[in-house]
Amino acid sequence: MDINNAKIIFKDYVSQYDSNDKRIIQKYEHSLRVCDLCKKIATYLNLSDDKILIAEFIGLLHDFGRFEQIKRYNTYNDRISVDHAKLGMDLLEEFGFDKFVKDKKTQEIIKIAVLNHNQTFIDDNLTEEELLFSQIIRDADKLDIFYIWKDMEIDKVEGKIDDKIYNRMLTCKYDYENINNKLDYYVLLIGFVYDINFSWTIRYLKENKYFNTIIDKVIEKNPHESFRLNKIKETINQYIESRDA
């Protein structure tokens, strides 16, 4: 497996999509950064060179379906379009998985990790190895989502945080239920931190100040919920400190 050659093939695949659409470029660049983050996490975990390489391939290919998703549905919202991970793996089979990875067992590991990267919870029936790679890609993907969102515009929202979401945030729990407005969405994005698997990821998140940058922007634009948002901020900072201890 040659990750540098894989990146060339990947770039050529993406070139068939509209390069004037900023979302296409964003997802291409996101894929490269996640690939690098997967390598860093796998290296931290002291995995073998072969397994580090598999982690890189998973990072590179985890959003293979995003480009076609935006072309077909003009959205990245899986809820109103399609599961982009499943679409990506179907498209990868059509495109030729062998162009990236020839070994069938490795292909299956990559596929399972990709299919689990965007689910609320990881499949309970994975092998130890499959679980490990699924955790790596989920951490790397979330790190880069925080990286992207720290520089994005935050909206003022008419409405309050859903009570169930608020209570889950204060008990360090995370899921996608009860999204009633964009403020709920922002809070759930912040709650990604509760789904982080490795201490390296927590430390990286803390050192780069992604979390506080995002939540402070949400508070600034939505002062009507500043009390509850600050309580969430306090709880998550305590959680991060406990994980980094």
Image (cartoon, rainbow, N blue to C red):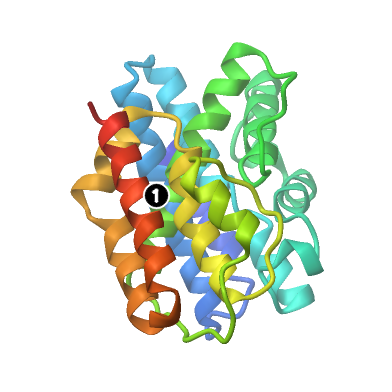
- Image quadrant where one finds the C terminus: top left
* Image position, residue 77 (x, y; %): 69, 67
| The image quarter in which residue 133 lies | top right
Measuring 79% from the left and 74% from the top, which residue is drawn there?
72
| Residue 124 located left or right of residue 63 | right
Residue 40 visible in the picture = no
In this view of the protein, which residue sits in the foreground, 27 or 9? 27
* Image position, residue 175 (x, y; %): 63, 47
Q: In the current view of this chain or complex, which residue is farthest to the left?
A: 207
Q: Is residue 65 above or below residue 156?
A: above
| The image quarter in which residue 50 lies | top left
Measuring 50% from the left and 28% from the top, which residue is drawn there?
54
Q: Which amino acid type corresponds to the residue marked 1 in the rendered image?
A: Leu
| Residue 121 located left or right of residue 55 | right
* Image position, residue 156 (x, y; %): 47, 86
In this view of the protein, which residue sits in the foreground, 25 or 74? 74
Q: Is residue 26 above or below residue 200?
A: below
Residue under pointer 1: 143
Secondary structure at numbered mark 1: helix
Residue 179 visible in the picture = yes
* Image position, residue 113 (x, y; %): 62, 33
In this view of the protein, which residue sits in the foreground, 229 or 148? 229
Measuring 30% from the left and 69% from the top, which residue is drawn there?
216
